Amino acid sequence: MEVAPRKSRWNKHGDRLLERHGQRVWRLGIDAGFSCPHREDGRGRGGCAFCAPEAGLAAYQHKGQEVVRGLEEQVSRAVGFTRTRYEAQSFFLYFQAYSCTNLPAADLGRIYGRAIESLETTAPGALRGMVVSTRPDCLSPEKAELLAGYAALGLEVWLELGLQSAQDKTLARINRGHDFAAFIQAARQTEGLGLRRACSALCGVRAWSGPFPQGSTRPSTPRGFPAFWRICWRSSLGMWKS
Ligand code: SF4
């Protein structure tokens, strides 16, 4: 007897990408040399309590003990690695490290453009889109328009906004340097531009009462999930459209 495949209870992002692009799409994590306004001298905020940007670097962003800094080299190593290991054919450029809109729009355009050109040279025709990760208080209408321009050219452009918690008290406790209203404002600023938007959240942080060690993202407990879904519901901004 043939057993019907079990229907997933989750609406998986990877499945939606497969539907839209006809094959799996791999994100290539890129550190394009951005900094973060929340860590820079002069603002005096010291960064989020859990900040550890280099902890998330992929294997191809390391050469032995060294971190690979060159944009073109990162792209080429990322393509080589994912092709060899996963037989990857289609890619998103994932601007991931720090706040990837933390420059004037013209400079951002030059950096995004370099990465796009580099991928087009390394893997012609394989670029499907880009994901830009940033803080909600690091956007402007010009930057949103810049991203919308890539979407207008046919790329799937995701804006990944860091939220972490919808509770202002929790945001203050983890030293996020912005409140929930700032997230809503950034999400509204990017509405109707053809961008796809996602938010990142720390699950379980509200339920936790211990000290928050610098560079730690723990704890992450299932108790945080209801809060996470509430964030999406409360914002009513079409997050996770895919
Ligand atoms: S916004 Fe991101 S990069 Fe900036 S301090 Fe917070 S975690 Fe670190």
Image (spheres, rainbow, N blue to C red):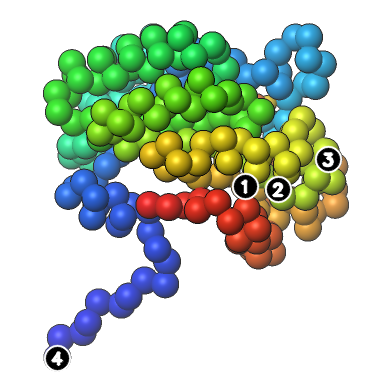
Question: Is any atom of residue 237 visible in this view?
Answer: yes
Which residue is identified by label 2? 165
Q: In front: 19, or 86? A: 19
Residue 43 is situated, as x and y percent measured from the top left of the image, at 78, 15
Q: Nearer the viewer, residue 193 or 41?
A: 193
First-in-chain label (1 vs 3):
3
On the image, numbered disc 4 is attached to which residue?
1
For mark 1, give the secondary structure.
strand
Q: Position of residue 191 (x, y in %)?
A: 50, 41
The quarter of the image holding the N terminus is bottom left
Residue mark closest to the camera, 2 vs 4 = 2
Kind of element beneath mark 2: loop
Real-space Cα separation, disc 1 to disc 2, in angstroms: 6 Å
State the mark number for residue 201.
1
**Amino acid identity at mark 3:** Arg
Q: Residue visible at 62% across and 24% down?
A: 138
**Taking 93 as reference, is 35 left or right?**
right
Distance from Cα at disc 2 to Cα at disc 4: 48 Å
The amino acid type, in three-letter code, at marker 1 is Ala
Query: Which callout, 2 or 3, points to the residue nearer the camera?
Result: 2
Q: Residue at x 70, y 55 (%)?
A: 204
Q: Earlier in the sequence, mark 1 or mark 2?
A: 2
Q: Residues within 10 Å of mark 4 (few under 14, many from 20)?
A: few
Please name the amino acid that badge 2 sits on: Ser
Q: Is residue 40 above or below residue 45?
A: above
Label 3 CB less than 8 angstroms from ligand 1: no
Where is residue 124? Give x, y as percent. 14, 23
Comparing 50 with 177, the one in front is: 177
**Residue at mark 1 to residue at mark 3: CA–CA distance:** 15 Å
Residue 24 against residue 40 in the figure, above or below: below
Q: Are marks 1 and 2 in contact (CB under 8 Å)?
A: yes
